[in-house]
Image: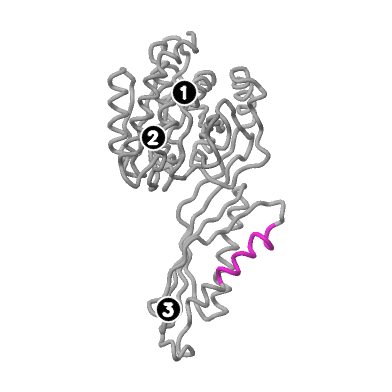
Amino acid sequence: MNISSEIERVLPGVIEIRRHVHMYPELSGEERETTAYLCDVLDKNGISYTVLPDNCGVVASVGHGNYAVGVRAELDALPITEDTGLEYASRNIGVMHACGHDIHFAAALGLLLLLKPHENELDHAIKVFFQPAEETVGGADDMIRHGCMQNPEVREVFGFHIAPTDKVGTVAYLPGAMNAAVTDFELTVRGRSCHGAHPEQGIDAIVAAAGVVSALQAVPARRFAPTTPTIVTVGTINGGTAGNVVAGEVKMTGTLRALDMDVMAELKRIVLETCENTAQGFGATVEIDYTTEYPVLYNDSSLTESTIQKIGKLIGKENIHKMDAPSLGADDFAFFCSHARCCYFNIGCRGANQGDDQVLHTPCLAPDEDSLRIALQILCAIV
């Protein structure tokens, strides 16, 4: 198989796929039309697939063998109104592929289209996990629980993310911990409401909540060594009913980040302890609920190094750089890392004429489509 000529064969169709998906983005948990479109393309090209129950994604495969190599691609978009001016801009107002999942989707589907005519040349199966809800509840975990890693067993999983701050034709990687573990929380501070003219008759939940927020800022700074990265962020706070009423309840939401699962466990314990002790000092009580949780995204070192060597032969070693430090951002690709050897990396998508406005999760994101050719080259070489 001549990979270069095969890429040129499928690339126009891959670009068309990307533009279609970009025009009709869907939010997490609502990816029904995207899934239907995917299945239609798979059916027309005779590619085997399974639709997982409970809207938990699609597993498509080519090749045969007693083991498989996996590739992850996401389906969902973000609640953002697009401002790119592209001819194929989102037609679903208020929803946009502002995280590059349309690029990931098209490249992974293009890989299947490229390999399908050559599947008898493969000595193993290649599975693509078309995953919903990456932006919210972590759809990767649901896919794994529904058996995507079995029949045949998936030994290695690859994933990539576009990087609009890096130019097209470059790749960034990091062996070991690349992205943080994350635990989101919902926190309720309960006091006792009363008239604002008689505060001594109540317990002010707003004052207690203010104390809790301030105390939490000291947790990363004073309860962990400076060499142990941790983050505690309170993102929302809501309470009170009127300006002359002492609030009886305040609700907050936030997120915890760490680069080690033992550190995350200790962080959760200390956060709970800090909240309870601080609220108690004001006569209030707290209730904390840890909700969405992702593990550390951990790249297998040997697999990552061998993968980067292959990529270097394709795009040149000078176009590959090792990241200086892990990101405290999270990606639910991390769930795959708990079940198989994994390699996750970033592919540059910034065009030569694009400026500083190219940032993920913003209305102006417009990845250069030349990154699709690079992604296809890389995926073909490593699977």
The circle drawn on residue 86 is 2
**Over which residues does the magenta segment extend?**
212-224
Q: Which residue is rendered at x = 51% and y = 21% of the image?
A: 383
Label 1 vs label 2, nearer the camera: 2
The residue indicated by pointer 3 is 248
In reply to whether residue 214 is colored magenta, the answer given is yes
- Relative depth, front residue between 199 and 64: 199
Identity of the residue drawn at 35% across and 32% down: 87
Residue depicted at 38% across the width and 48% down the height? 79
Residue underneath mark 1: 68
- Up-down: is 360 above or below 237? above
N-terminal of the two: label 1 or label 2? 1
Q: Residues within 10 Å of mark 2 (few under 14, many from 20)?
A: few
* CA distance separating discs 2 and 3: 50 Å
Q: Is residue 212 visible?
A: yes
* Residue 221 drawn at (x, y percent): 67, 61
Q: Secondary structure at mark 3?
A: loop
How far apart in space, not on screen, are marks 1 and 3 (Cα)?
56 Å
Q: Is residue 76 above or below residue 306?
A: below
CA–CA distance in space, label 1 to label 2? 38 Å
Which amino acid type is shown beneath numbered disc 2? Leu
Tag in front: 1 or 3: 3
Instruction: Please determine whether, in this image, residue 67 is positioned above or below residue 138.
Output: above
Which of label 2 and label 3 is nearer to you? 2
- Which numbered disc flags the more N-terminal residue, 1 or 3? 1
Magenta run includes residue 372: no
